[in-house]
Image: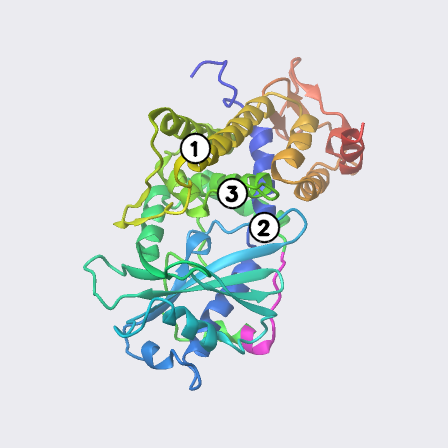
Amino acid sequence: MSDQYPFNHTDTLDEVLLDVATLIELSPHDRRVAESRYRRLKTHLEREKSPLAVYLADGRSLIYAQGSIATSTTIISGTEDDRFDVDAIVEIDVPSGWDNTQALDLLEESLQGFPGVIGIERCTRCVQLQFPFMHMDVTILDRRERITIDRAGDIFHSPDRGLATRVPSNPWGFTNWFRSQVGVGQALFAESIRRHRDTVSKNRLRYLDEDERMVVAKADQHDLPPAIPSAIDAQEAVALKLLKRFVNLRYEEASLPRPPSIYLTKRAGNVVYVEQGLAAQLFMLADLTAKLLRQHIADGTRPQEENPSYPPDLINDRWPRDGALGVSDMKTFAEELEFLSERLNQMAVVPLSEISKAIDELFGERIGKEQRQVLAERYDRRSSPAAVLSEPRTGSIYAPAIVVAPERKQAVPRHNFHPLILDSEDDE
């Protein structure tokens, strides 16, 4: 690539984006807490008073993670709250005599009294367990038909109004597909994000009681190796976390429906590894997805993303909407992605202080403030007289212990790393 390509030298931007990704994800501690709740889910649904207990005692039924928790791309939701949304599948042979609402009805009944919940809500395709700082969406999957595709079946779509139906689904297969696409990550990148987690990770979830602390060790729930607690440290997965955070914020108060997370995950799995780094990976994911949506609009078509493990499972079956509303959905999302791409292009060649301001805009002011505090602590020079150096218009920073300052490198002003001064600049 030519020197005009803005992502050839983005050490600083990549470092900042790694901070953001680490701040918005489940910490290792939070993963362990989430794991304990998955395992307690099995115990609770198999208790004597559970209407579903008999269907989980057949030796074939499983309970396992799906969605972002299974792909290790769970992030916090909202601008102010630190809530994680995680998903679980309860796989059973649904009796042929049940109608399409009965499975969710009995699931909701079976989940009553779940330890530590502050609320239980029946949703269109799941029942949601609400904890402090965390929701768990529990979905029934019917495997009675014994489809030859591993762990494929039907979930139930039961809206408040309209006909209840079945929807083909294979979350297990999709998880395995995504992990096969992104692999386990490049060694240097994986080491870099582990270093960030050591200093940046923020624990949000707390054990509800001592029983929950012990349930991981005691439970015999099926172990799904690609799910929790193992984490993907691939650059593609980290870029997906950043894109999901951006989308969540941009749609937080929007009247249009938000593109589903699984659609973004499919797109991330389809975008190849970009060797120039995390910023370039995020740019490529946003830019290519925007171009794809623009092409659909021009052709009068819409995305029909299939689950590669089970094509009848259409992962974006509810987005975009039909007709003109769907065109509006695609156009709005394309515009948001183009905005993100443009900002990343700018951030690749601006000083650190400008990068920090843009983080507020793209990922939220609270996360931006936390990231600046992390950066201030990382490059605090009060105990060292040596300057931190940056190379103009490259986005690179240099540790004084290993770099001799050539003429074209400049000392970075101390205030660039000070969150209070950066915050005051935002107010000007």
CA distance separating discs 2 and 1 = 26 Å
| Residue 281 part of the magenta segment | no
In what element is the residue under mark 1?
A: helix
Depth check, mark 2 against mark 1: the one in front is 1
Mark 1 is on which residue type? Val
Query: Dot 1 surroundings within 10 Å: few (below 14), some, or many (20 or more)?
Result: many
**Measuring 20% from the left and 61% from the top, which residue is drawn there?**
147
**Measuring 45% from the left and 33% from the top, which residue is drawn there?**
330
User: Farthest front residue?
Assistant: 162
Q: Position of residue 341 (x, y in %)?
A: 52, 27
Of label 2 and label 1, which has the lower sequence position? 2
Whether residue 274 is situated above or below residue 213 in the rendered picture: above
Q: Quadrant of the C terminus?
A: top right
Mark 2 is on which residue type? Ser
Mark 3 is on which residue type? Lys
In what element is the residue under mark 2?
A: strand
The residue pinned by badge 2 equals: 77
- Write the start and end of the magenta stretch as one range: 203-212
Residue 218 in sight from this viewpoint: no
Q: Please tell me the numbered disc located at residue 244.
A: 3
Q: Disc 3 vs disc 2: Cβ atoms closer than 8 Å?
A: no
